[in-house]
């Protein structure tokens, strides 16, 4: 949306990481937003985060009116995520009100209305000057009412009343069997409807979010993965990132002189992505470690994600070839995050990447190896994840290095990952082991290097106690194709 459009259609920050990007600014200010979904999908947490972040980040007081959980239970349930509702209530910025409704006591009559609720809610809003309101969950109000006419009239009156109060309201609702909510009416009178979904695929739990409608505003229409961790809810935009990032002309060293000399510019462009491929034992991790050391020598922090080796094993192995990771780990220039891919789904790994980027502000990121990710997702899913990660790294001008296993008898596994990332990478370096004159012969070949000429010939190298050691340099042959 343009700036002038936003002025005509004011929006309120949702407080959910990544969601405002999809909604092009946030929730519609002063209008009701319906959050619907099945049990355990995160509706209540979603609404609590909306209120808490509104108070902390925008100084907008909020009211949470619950029809199911008591204030004590609600506070206890969200405390593990760092949300201290009791402290916010004591500060006068938050009011939590539990309204007990006994469905057996509700009688369907032509005079049924929500007047008592309006009075109670109006008092709560005015007492703290609330700008945000949550009603959790709306089904409790109409559990004993079967007359659609009464339901529709009272829902419209409720939503109209909230609009007149000028508060941005989040209303949660349980998903129905054949509609977005049990009553099937709330979505028609809401200005914005967001559907949350919790599913298990191949024994891996995933959560998805979709904006069903948003009156008066452009918005993303895909399904977006979202996660619940110790920092609350985070949404991962899938296609919202556009190819609008800049391209640096600054060249940085790869950490190996002969590799730099094989590139016309004497290195690779800052913020570029490099794919290192090869079969098992071709020294992919060692080459990635040289990239890491080049960044450290520039005093630029490195974030190293390892899917196969623990930090201690990686430190020991690099130490055997003269690369001192431990010293730089202690100095804070190197950060190693290690886990098995199967520990969590692709979305959780991606959020882990995002959180580490925000916390550590690295200049170089290494993922070793991305081929391990194929064990927890299809080639298309891995590709989608890596596209999002690559776009993020490029937007932040972070050097990216990915390693991937390729082996003739594992083409159905390793090569799928290469296909998923090779066309997206700016540079591609392939390592190979073969037998020549009864001895093992290691070679390195630059498959491509976008934006610069390079030597396409295979170059022999050995691994010594000082890392990569190239054989006598061959005559430079420059390939200007990219």
Image (cartoon, grey):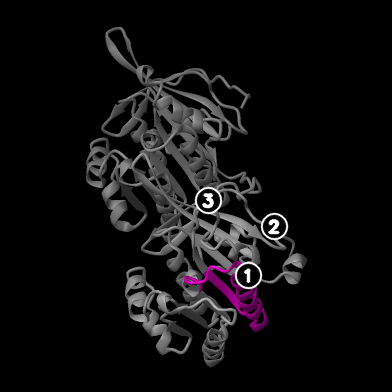
Residue sitting nearer the eye, 403 or 378: 378
In the displayed structure, would residue 66 be above or below residue 95?
above
Residue 291 x/y as whole percent: 42, 40
Q: Secondary structure at mark 1?
A: helix
Q: How many marks?
A: 3
Q: Pointer 2: residues within 10 angstroms few (<14), some, or many (20+)? A: few
> In the image, residue 480 lies at what x, y percent?
63, 24
Q: Nearer the viewer, residue 401 or 111?
A: 111
Q: CA distance from mark 2 to mark 3?
A: 16 Å
Mark nearer the N terminus (3 vs 1)? 1
Residue range of the region highlighted in magenta in the rendering: 142-171
- Residue 68 lies in magenta, yes or no? no
Q: Are marks 3 and 1 in contact (CB under 8 Å)?
A: no
Question: Who comes first in sequence, dot 2 or dot 1?
Answer: 1
Q: Position of residue 105 (x, y in %)?
A: 42, 79
**Which residue lies under the disc numbered 1?**
149
Discs 2, 3 touching: Cβ within 8 Å: no
Q: Which residue is mark 3?
A: 224
Q: Is residue 148 magenta?
A: yes
Q: Secondary structure at mark 2?
A: loop
Q: Of callouts 2 and 3, which one flags the residue occurring earlier in the amino acid sequence?
A: 2
Measure how far apart labels 2 and 1 are at the Cα level.
32 Å
- The answer, for residue 30, to whether it is visible in the render is no
């Amino acid at each position: 949306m343009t700036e002038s459009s936003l002025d005509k259609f004011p929006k309120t920050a949702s407080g959910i990481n990544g969601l405002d990007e999809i909604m092009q600014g946030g929730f519609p200010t002063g209008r009701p937003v319906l959050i619907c979904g099945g049990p355990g999908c995160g509706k209540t947490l979603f609404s609590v985060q909306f209120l808490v972040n509104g108070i902390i980040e925008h100084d907008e007081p909020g009211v949470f009116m619950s029809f199911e959980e008591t204030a004590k239970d609600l506070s206890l349930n969200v405390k593990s995520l760092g949300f201290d509702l009791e402290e916010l209530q004591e500060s006068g910025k938050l009011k939590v009100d539990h309204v007990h409704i006994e469905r057996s006591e509700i009688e369907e009559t032509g005079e049924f209305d929500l007047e008592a609720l309006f009075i109670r809610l109006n008092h709560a809003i005015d007492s703290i000057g609330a700008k945000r309101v949550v009603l959790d969950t709306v089904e409790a109000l109409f559990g004993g009412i079967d007359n659609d006419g009464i339901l529709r009239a009272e829902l419209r009156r409720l939503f109209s009343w909230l609009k007149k109060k000028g508060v941005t309201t989040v209303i949660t609702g349980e998903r129905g069997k054949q509609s977005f909510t049990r009553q099937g009416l709330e979505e028609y009178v809401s200005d914005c409807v967001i559907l949350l979904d919790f599913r298990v695929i191949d024994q891996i739990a995933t959560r998805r979010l979709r904006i069903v409608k948003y009156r008066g505003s452009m918005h993303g229409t895909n399904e977006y993965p979202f996660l619940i961790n110790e920092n609350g809810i985070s949404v991962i935009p899938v296609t919202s990132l556009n190819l609008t990032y800049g391209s640096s002309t600054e060249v940085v060293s790869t950490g190996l002189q002969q590799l730099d000399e094989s590139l016309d510019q004497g290195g690779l462009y800052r913020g570029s992505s490099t794919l290192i491929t090869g079969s098992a034992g071709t020294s992919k991790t060692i080459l990635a470690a040289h990239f890491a050391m080049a960044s450290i020598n520039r005093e630029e922090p490195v974030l190293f994600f390892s899917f196969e080796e623990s930090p201690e094993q990686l430190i020991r192995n690099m130490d055997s070839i003269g690369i001192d990771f431990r010293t730089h780990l202690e100095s804070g220039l190197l950060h190693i995050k290690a886990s098995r891919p199967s520990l969590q789904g692709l979305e959780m790994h991606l959020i882990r990447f995002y959180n580490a980027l925000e916390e550590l502000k690295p200049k170089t990121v290494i993922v070793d190896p991305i081929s391990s990710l194929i064990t927890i997702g299809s080639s298309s899913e891995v590709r989608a994840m890596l596209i999002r990660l690559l776009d993020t790294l490029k937007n932040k001008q972070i050097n990216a290095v990915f390693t991937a296993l390729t082996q003739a008898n594992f083409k159905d596994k390793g090569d799928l990952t290469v296909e998923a990332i090779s066309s997206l990478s700016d540079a591609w370096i392939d390592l190979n082991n073969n037998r020549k004159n009864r001895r093992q012969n290691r070679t390195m070949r630059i498959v491509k290097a976008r934006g610069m000429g390079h030597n396409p010939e295979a170059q022999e190298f050995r691994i010594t106690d000082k890392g990569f050691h190239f054989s006598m340099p061959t005559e430079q042959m420059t390939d200007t194709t990219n």
